[in-house]
Image: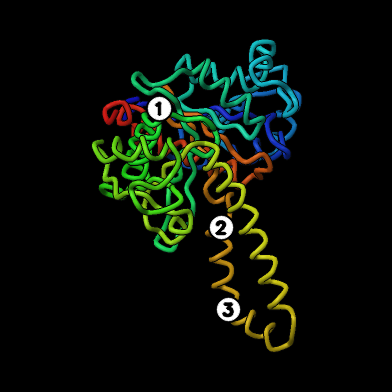
Amino acid sequence: MANNAKVIIAVDAMGGDLAPQAAVLGAVAASHDNAIDKILLVGAKDSIAPILHGQKYDGSKIEIIHASEVIGNDEAPTNAIRQKKDSSVVVGLNLVKSGDAAAFVSAGATGAVLAGATVIVGRIKGVQRPALASVFPSAKGYTFIIDIGANVDSRPEFLVQFAQMGAVYMEEIMGIKNPKVGLINNGAEAEKGNALCKEAYPLLMESNVNFIGNVEARDVPLGAVDVAVCDGFVGNVILKYSEGFAKGIMGMLKEELMGSAISKMGALLSKGAYANLRKRFDYTEVGGAPFIGLNGLVVKAHGSSNEKAIMNAIKQCSKFIQADITTKIQNKI
């Protein structure tokens, strides 16, 4: 997409635990961003319109696209995509395919969104497998982990393309020149790992990315690399563990700080620092996980996304569109 193209983003108003409220209010908040030309709220008009009523926004920047069906988390993804043609997911993805929207955001059923995106939107020419990715906080800023769940079984050449796509994202969106790329493994030595990692290593060494070698999982939060590459099984385990660890450590910290009068006083003095730390681990600040490698942008937001998370997912799409990531990935590959 050309950089001067209109930034039009479709949002699944019916997807997620807090739908449609979170999606609609998040869209209203994002619509105040001057870089965004229009937001298309996809879903049941009778459910969306009452929430919009009374909100302050430019009426020309938000439009309801009616979709009469919803795909649930318990439905088989492929069957649901085929059978529910008028679902908010299918209608939203078709808006990207037709060019009426440059991106689609959904907090709905992950399987349906990923399956539908691959089938409906399609892959960038040359990309063998699109990948789901996310930005994780680290001691040196952020690390982009790719794949975090789209391809639980991968081939070595897939990992090379994940590295290429991740490098483009970190350079264009996060502003990191020549980002360092590492392969997540159970040791730093080149000969370490399973068959997939052993075969991927030499291919990554010969690729057009700044590959620095293997990294262990503990190195990721320390900021050893800007892009961490793995298959979707490993990436999803890291993602789920990180979410639980962040929540658990914050809970334990709060318990300790409230344990005595002295610790409470210390907590009060350090309130700002703790708030900043919590913010770095807050998934709502990032918005969602981009499904990279498609002929358009699809962002999968967390199922429990609130208004803030949806707003930031929409703004994330805006940056992606303006940076013309899709074209740059195709050029890289």
Image location of residue 84, percent across then percent down: 69, 13
Task: Specify whether 89 is left or right of 157.
Answer: right
Specify the farthest residue to the bottom. Answer: 262
| Residue 218 drawn above or below residue 183 | below
Q: Look at mark 3 in the image and give the residue it sits on.
A: 270
Q: Look at mark 2 in the image and give the residue it sits on.
A: 281
Quadrant of res 27: top right
Amino acid type indicated by mark 2:
Phe
Q: Residue at x 55, y 27 (%)?
A: 10
Q: Residue at x 57, y 20 (%)?
A: 116
Q: Residue at x 63, y 35 (%)?
A: 107
Label 2 SS: loop
Q: CA distance from mark 3 to mark 2?
A: 17 Å
Q: Earlier along the polypeptide chain: callout 3 or callout 2?
A: 3
Quarter the N terminus occupies: top left
Quarter the C terminus occupies: top left
Find residue 6 and name its label. 1
